[in-house]
Image (cartoon, rainbow, N blue to C red):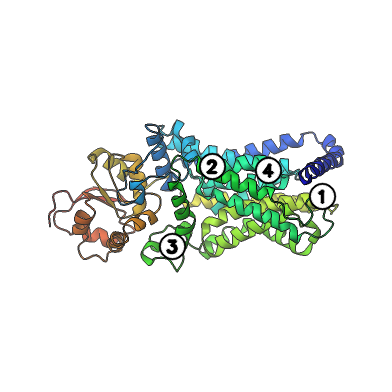
Amino acid sequence: MTSARAKKDRRSRKVTATSSQAAEIRQERIPPLAKLILASVAVIGLLFALRARAPLPWSYDEYYHLGLAREMRSGLRIESFRWTPFSILFDRFVDSTPLFHVLLMPFATLSLPTAGRIGVLLGQVFLVGSFAWALWSLRVPRPWWFVLALPALGTLFVQRLEMLRPQVWLIGFTVLVVALLAERRWKALFVVCALFGLTHTGGWIAIPLAVLWSLSGLAIPPGSGEPEGRRIPWQPMAAAAAGWLLGQLVHPEVPANFRLFLISNFVVPFQSTGAGDAALRSQLGTEMSRPEWGILAEQWPAFIAPAIVLFALLFQPRLRSRATLTAGIVSLAFLVAGSLAARRFFELGAPLALLALALVSRERQEKGFPPLLPEWGRLAAAVTILVGALWTMSTLRGYGYGVASPPLEMARWLGEHGRPSERVFTVQWADSSPLLYAAPQLQSLVALDPTVFYMKNPKLFQIYVEIVAGRHPDPARAIRQQFGARWATVPYNFYAQVASQLAKSPGVKLVYGDRDYAVMDLGSWKP
């Protein structure tokens, strides 16, 4: 009965909203849906143009994803990650993002720039399309302005959209989950959550989102018009949890996928804190670190929407609904975490805050509040969006991502000269990903995350850290004897100490060098 009343109320609200906007729509020369589509196409075009002008990988992980998708063309199920014998995934490989790699398979064998462009474009279309659909489905007033604001959400968010990585799909799926919760479409939520968990290991966040949506009714003022009132509905929690669980149960590596789920979502974040292992923490990437103040200052456009949302929810109680509270609280939580703990969370909080602002705007319209912005304010908002987008794009282009990829030529050289099953000691552990792509006949240390190296052999990982830090008394001997590696790759601009140690070691030859990398051959050296 509750579900039937909710659907009836939703239909009546749609009729009311449609009739109230009918006169305005008739006066518009371009239909609202056409405006939304044009805005989405413009945003996708702008985002894709940035990647098209800088087509090489924007992160090391792109090599891994394209390389793995290419290998999956020979056998969809990979049971051992034979390229990294020092990882727990060597013994039992589990793909944390299987659907993402299946999407990449059709074009993974194309040239690196072409495959990268196509993969990035797919992610951008999915995210922008999900955002636009959510706005239209939720009957947000003037939804095209919110879509046009996406490129103005700061460098951390836009930089992610230019990468061929599953985090882009994580953001898109999260937007869909919030929209489906607001629309009370439990069957669709079930399906989306199942796909979400197979596309990104973080798909489980749909469950706490559903829990928050159900509990947020307790904070809604009486007489707010919410179909469920202040009750705690069980349907969204059940749909989200059951959908995610179904996705995990059909995973080709069940039950091992649950172990990787725990590692990716709990062990890695814990190890990035002060309570984690110091050696491992020293090797974790910048994404799990707090952004510098200069980086945060570059995100100034992304703080506008959450500031408005926070003010509205605190000082205008009538605007509190399950939808506004869920999107607002989650977006603010991610922005605070991304600003003070791990910058990776910021890229999710920024678009969710924009979605929360759109929901607040809808709530104002439905409850008879005056427009969020007067006529002059709309012009100011348009100028702010334009300035924010120009700032974000110009700042991001100044970083030089995608114009050159330092490890690519090094990896290609090893692909030409390395023999099958020879091992490479990568001083920068992330170089294993370019080697997987350009020299798949070789073995290296660990790909994607050093935690799986640390978990397999903590003592050997400690030796690795001592070597790369330049503290080991005889790195060449350790590399040859304890890692069984013939080759060593050194980005000597960042590891000058170990580069100097290896160059002075007996029997070690410098066989390749460019402005970024050196490749050293330890081949015939003996203790």
User: On residue 365, which mark appears?
Assistant: 1
Q: Secondary structure at mark 3?
A: helix
Residue that mark 2 sits on: 247
User: Which amino acid is tagged 3?
Assistant: Gln
Q: Is residue 346 above or below residue 146?
A: below
Task: Answer with left or right where residue 94 lies relative to residue 298.
Answer: left
Depth check, mark 4 against mark 3: the one in front is 4
Q: Position of residue 41 (x, y in %)?
A: 63, 36
Residue 34 appears in the rendering: yes
Q: Is residue 388 something that shows in the picture?
A: no
Q: Is residue 348 left or right of residue 384?
A: left
Dot 4 corresponds to which residue? 186
Give the CA separation, mark 1 to mark 3: 46 Å
Q: Quadrant of residue 468?
A: bottom left
Which numbered disc, 2 or 1, marks the residue closer to the eye?
2
Q: Position of residue 107 (x, y in %)?
A: 45, 32
C-alpha gap between disc 3 and disc 2: 27 Å
**Residue type pointed to by label 2:** Gly
